[in-house]
Image (spheres, rainbow, N blue to C red):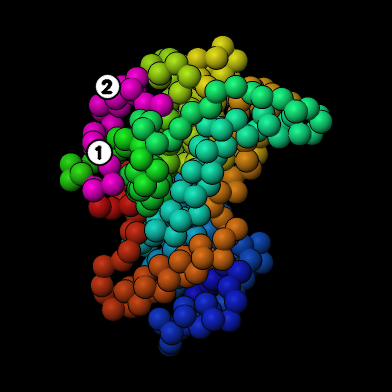
Amino acid sequence: MIVLLPLEAPLRARLEAAAPDWEFLYREPSTATDSEIEEAIAIVGNLPPARLSKAQNLKLLQLNSAGTDGYTAPGVLPSGALLANATGAYGLGISEYMMGVLLSLSKKLPGYYDCQRAGQWKDLGPVRAVCGSHVLAVGLGDIGGRFARLCKAFGAQVTGVRRAGTDKPEYVDRLVLIDALDTVLPEADTVALSLPGTKATYHLFDRERIAKMKPGALLLNVGRGTAIDPDALCDALESGHLGGAAIDVTEPEPLPAGHRLWKAPNLLITPHVSGGFHMPQTLGLIAEIAAYNLAAIRQGQPLRSLVDLETGYRKL
């Protein structure tokens, strides 16, 4: 099997203990050879989808990402191969990022940083509180659920939006399904998106939906940049309809120099860094999911974070 993650010895040992009779090859995505891919029973890591056509013996592709973009299309995986993502590994890091940018926008910290750089002692006026505000968490997986918990701890009223399932988690005050999004959208002071990139989520926040948001509301996006129409976002920020936004993902991505998003007012942009391997804990959690699934597939047991190839979502 092939491992495409930058694992140190303890995490390698954890993986190898899950499948002691398998041979482990540690590679980078660019250095794995076609013959190695062809022989691989399992691959841990995001091998480019185009290269998977060689993997005729593959039983499991364990992604190191929560997103499954490019891997669920017909013909990408060989017949019978299972796909698992890394849902459960990124909630800690990304939810803390989301709370960080929410507080930053709420307290006008980017503006004060600009004043600092300009050597200006300047009061920028009223700020907002998270406590007592209404937060709409669109997507209640590991990431959205953890963010909802943080907001609840800060004293916010939290409404959760999910695709399916009516059991309300204790960390949200209200739960609605995605078809009721427009009903709750005008009430929210902050709207936080943690959605995968699918046909159903493409430009979910288009010009019409952004116009339904409360004037002055904040919009956060950490899922996929395609969930928001970038021109509609720029227009809403420039007009003042939105009070601010923070995006760790963009459309297109990487965001090219000269794109109008760079100069949109009250917008925080980071280059898809809220997740990844920036926190050591994240890599350890990915290795734990992979080790569990390697043992499970050898024993014929159910996998964690198994992906439904029809929807691109983790199976409930």
Amino acid type at circle 1 is Asp
The residue indicated by pointer 1 is 173
Residue 278 spot, x, y in % from top left: 60, 58
- The mark found on residue 183 in the picture is 2
Q: Mark 2–mark 1 contact, CB under 8 Å? A: no
Task: Name the amino acid, label 2.
Answer: Thr
Q: Residue at x 25, y 26 (%)?
A: 180
Q: Is residue 43 visible?
A: no
Crowding at dot 2, Cα within 10 Å, few <14 / some 14-19 / many 20+, comes out as: few
Q: Residue at x 25, y 52 (%)?
A: 316
Is residue 173 on the magenta stretch? yes
Closer to the camera, 229 or 263?
263
Crowding at dot 1, Cα within 10 Å, few <14 / some 14-19 / many 20+, comes out as some
Rounded to the nearest whole Å, what is the CA distance between mark 2 and mark 1? 16 Å
Residue 3 position within the rendered picture, expressed as x and y whole percent measured from the top left: 54, 71
At mark 1, the secondary structure is loop
- Residue 242 makes an appearance in the image: yes
Left or right: 140 as drawn, with respect to 251? left
Residue 14 disc label: none
Q: Give the residues drawn in magenta, as a range.
A: 169-189
Q: Which label lies toward us, 2 or 1?
A: 1
Residue that appears at 20% across and 44% down: 168
In the displayed structure, would residue 208 be above or below residue 224?
above
Query: Hey, which quadrant is residue 47 in on the image?
Result: bottom right
Give the x, y percent position of residue 123.
66, 24
- Compared across the picture, whether 161 is left or right of 146 comes to left
Residue at left 43%, top 71%?
A: 288
